Image (cartoon, rainbow, N blue to C red):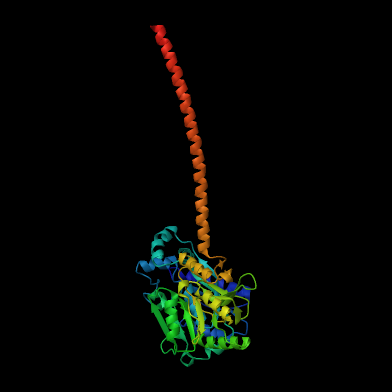
């Protein structure tokens, strides 16, 4: 929110109506950020939509560079708000995605109203972003956004899920490892499914040495039939647990046996190539693949994993903090079970994404544990060998290179020494001739 918001609203509505016209969709008449009750408005629109219809909506960005400056200057109020308050809701892209999910929509940002960001502001903000573990490239992109345009589709058959109030849902156990309580509070704990009066069990574990330490404790302590291993930065809408049970039963009926492991996003690769499968919002992008769900897959992303409480599966401690979804799927495959991706849209509101050394450690552990299964394909990488073997080869190549350099240097040194000997011999001959000449000259002079 920033000064000049009326002009931004006008540009935003023009963009919303243009996109809606191009798609033949329904355009919301005003930004979500200016509705008295944006959730109620979205639910009302969803209920009135014909099958297959889409909605285009917009919202002002409360995290633009101008808004950041005003916030840091301790004056976030808008012109005119001193005299008369108007309904305003504070939205960023993550807030918009969560709001639309709760209303039963699967949405994606398709356009923005943007202005350039002062490079000096970005440079000055870089240390703060690093301290907060904020992706600087993504932050720079969104600081320049004054408003978002989103296209939203109704989640398939969501009315059946919404018909079950949270208090009447079959209970589920959720298990999460926590290292950032603010991330937890703003995402998983902010999920309407886990709000006051929820029948669901939430187990959180802090100070763990690996994901396995906390998640395996949660599996042991779980009280309900389905256990959801979930990350602290995941947001799930109120209807998600009801949909989980329906999707689990649908997958079980389709296959003739319940899945041993499930989640909202995974990968198929045993038939060749890499096919991403699933439906989720990852940071600021909607991931929704064409393959119908539920679907059998070969691996799962560990953002959300679902297991029956009576499972013998356990998270492998050596794998660390990454790729334990892949490892669990490998365990299932080895045991003759099957792994499913269910249609369970959620928002993965991760701050930062980088395949760092801890990720490569997890790759190495998988390669060492499952050498007969290589190559192992994940949603982020392909493991063709144990990285430790590659490092040994790199070390051997380095040593060989240094040996070759040493050999060349030794040969050059030998050549230089031979040249020195030759020059010394020449010098000795010259000195001897000079001495003879001096003796002759001395005799003549005498």
Total numbered circles: 0
On the image, which quarter does residue 56 sit in? bottom right
Q: In the displayed structure, does residue 135 sit left or right of residue 342?
A: left
Q: Which one is nearer the viewer's eye here, 85 or 374?
A: 374
**Would residue 318 be visible to someone looking at this image?**
yes
At x 53%, y 54%, the residue is: 397
Q: Is the C terminus in the top left, top right, bottom left or bottom right quadrant?
A: top left
Q: Residue at x 59, y 84 (%)?
A: 156
Q: Say which of 126 and 6 sits in front.
A: 126
Q: Position of residue 264 (x, y in %)?
A: 54, 79
Residue 69 in which image quadrant: bottom left
Q: Position of residue 284 (x, y in %)?
A: 51, 71
Q: Quadrant of residue 254?
A: bottom right
> x and y percent of residue 10 in the render?
51, 71
Is residue 140 shown above or below 299? above
Name the outermost residue toward the bottom.
168
Left/right placement of residue 264 relative to residue 358 reads right
């Amino acid at each position: 929110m920033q000064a000049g918001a009326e002009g931004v609203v006008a540009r935003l509505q023009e963009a919303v109506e243009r996109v809606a016209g191009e798609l033949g969709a329904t355009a919301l008449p005003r930004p979500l950020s200016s509705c008295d009750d944006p959730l109620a408005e979205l639910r009302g629109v969803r209920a009135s939509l014909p099958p297959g219809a889409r909605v285009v909506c917009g919202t002002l960005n409360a995290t633009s560079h101008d808004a950041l400056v005003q916030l840091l200057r301790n004056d976030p109020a808008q012109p005119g708000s001193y005299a008369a308050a108007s309904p305003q809701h504070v939205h960023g892209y993550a807030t918009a995605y969560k709001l639309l999910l709760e209303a039963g929509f699967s949405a994606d940002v398709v356009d923005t109203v943007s202005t350039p960001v002062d490079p000096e502001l970005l440079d000055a903000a870089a240390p703060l972003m690093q301290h907060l573990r904020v992706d600087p490239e993504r932050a720079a992109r969104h600081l320049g956004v004054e408003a978002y345009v989103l296209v939203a589709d109704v989640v398939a058959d969501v009315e059946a899920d919404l018909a079950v109030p949270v208090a009447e849902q079959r209970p589920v156990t959720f298990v999460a490892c926590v290292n950032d309580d603010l991330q937890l509070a703003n995402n998983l704990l902010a999920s309407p499914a886990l709000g006051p009066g929820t029948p669901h069990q939430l187990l959180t574990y802090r100070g763990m040495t690996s994901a396995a330490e906390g998640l395996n404790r949660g599996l042991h302590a779980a009280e309900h039939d389905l256990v959801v291993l979930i990350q602290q930065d995941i947001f799930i809408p109120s209807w998600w647990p009801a949909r989980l049970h329906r999707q689990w039963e649908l997958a079980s009926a389709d296959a003739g046996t319940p899945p041993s492991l499930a989640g909202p996003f995974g990968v198929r690769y045993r038939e060749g190539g890499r096919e991403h499968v699933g439906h989720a919002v990852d940071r600021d992008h909607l991931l929704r693949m064409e393959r119908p769900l539920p679907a059998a897959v070969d691996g799962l992303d560990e953002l959300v994993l679902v297991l029956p409480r009576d499972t013998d599966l356990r998270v492998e401690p050596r794998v660390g903090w990454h790729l334990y979804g892949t490892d669990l799927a490998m365990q299932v495959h080895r045991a003759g079970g099957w792994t499913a991706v269910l249609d369970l849209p959620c928002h993965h509101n991760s701050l930062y994404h980088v395949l760092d050394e801890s990720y490569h450690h997890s790759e190495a552990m998988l390669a060492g544990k499952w050498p007969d299964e290589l190559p192992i394909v994940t949603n982020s990488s392909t493991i063709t060998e144990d990285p430790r073997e590659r490092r040994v080869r790199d070390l051997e190549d380095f040593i060989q290179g240094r040996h070759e350099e040493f050999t060349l240097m030794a040969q050059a040194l030998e050549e230089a020494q031979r040249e020195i000997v030759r020059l010394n011999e020449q010098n000795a001959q010259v000195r001897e001739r000079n001495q003879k000449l001096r003796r002759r000259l001395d005799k003549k002079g005498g």
